[in-house]
Image (cartoon, rainbow, N blue to C red):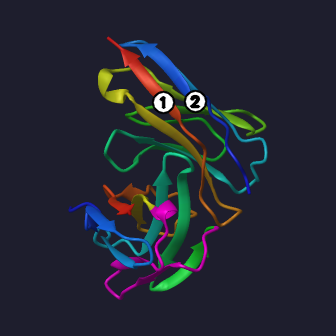
Amino acid sequence: KAGVTQTPRYLIKTRGQQVTLSCSPISGHRSVSWYQQTPGQGLQFLFEYFSETQRNKGNFPGRFSGRQFSNSRSEMNVSTLELGDSALYLCASVDRGLFGTGELFFGEGSRLTVL
Amino acid sequence: DAKTTQPNSMESNEEEPVHLPCNHSTISGTDYIHWYRQLPSQGPEYVIHGLTSNVNNRMASLAIAEDRKSSTLILHRATLRDAAVYYCILTGSARQLTFGSGTQLTVLP
């Protein structure tokens, strides 16, 4: 069974640009959640999508958005990039909802650098 | 939101047991306690989870206090491959996933 795949693995953007990151979950998993990891703030929950609907959202500004497609693949978008958005963005998938007992499977992350 | 508190770092000798503590005094009755670990340059990896009773799996054991305000992840025989950042996480009532700062485990040969 293939694991969670995130693309691109590395990218560099400049302030004011926007970026789209992609996450392909494990086959059969309907929940995809996104996280931001920085040295200063640690791991922070961004949002969860389940069956194409955003079910839960963390405390991030509206510049951070996402969506999920019918095949459960998910994308997150960050608009008007700021220097502080430089981070490792992780996604995870689980077969049932995020807030159950299922094991989360994480991808290796997309490392975004904003210059 | 329910929060977790963990020591920043711990050390253990190889092949000795390791007890990693986590405090979660604001846990609610429906929150599950999950543990994940993250090796350098990798995404977090599931270790174990539980609700009220102690749990064992092939990787570790989870001991949950009777009042559920704390828990301990037990690695029975630490190996060099267990060196990682260990996160204690609560899921459930708040509809958010709250990560603590994690404990950096160093395993000494």
Circle 1 marks a residue in which chain?
A: B
Q: Residue at horizontal 48%, vertical 79%?
A: A80
Q: Is residue B4 above or below residue A20?
A: above
Compared across the picture, whether A5 is left or right of A70 comes to left
Highlighted magenta segment, given as a residue range: A59-85
Screen quadrant of the N terminus of chain A: bottom left
Q: Dot 1 surroundings within 10 Å: few (below 14), some, or many (20 or more)?
A: many
Callouts 1 and 2 close, C-beta under 8 Å: yes
Q: Is residue A72 above or below residue A9?
A: below
The residue pinned by badge 2 equals: B8
Mark 2 packing: few (<14 Cα in 10 Å), some, or many (20+)?
A: few
Spot occupied by residue B66 in the image (x, y as percentages of width and height) = 75, 34
Q: Which mark is residue A92?
A: none
- The quadrant where residue A31 appears: bottom left
Report whether A19 appears left or right of B56: left
Q: Name above or below for residue B80 compared with residue B90.
A: above
Q: State yes or no: residue B84 in magenta.
A: no
- Which amino acid type is marked by label 1? Gln
Amino acid type, mark 2: Asn
Asked whether A79 falls inside the magenta stretch, the response is yes
**Residue A87: in sight, yes or no?**
yes
Q: Chain of mark 2?
A: B
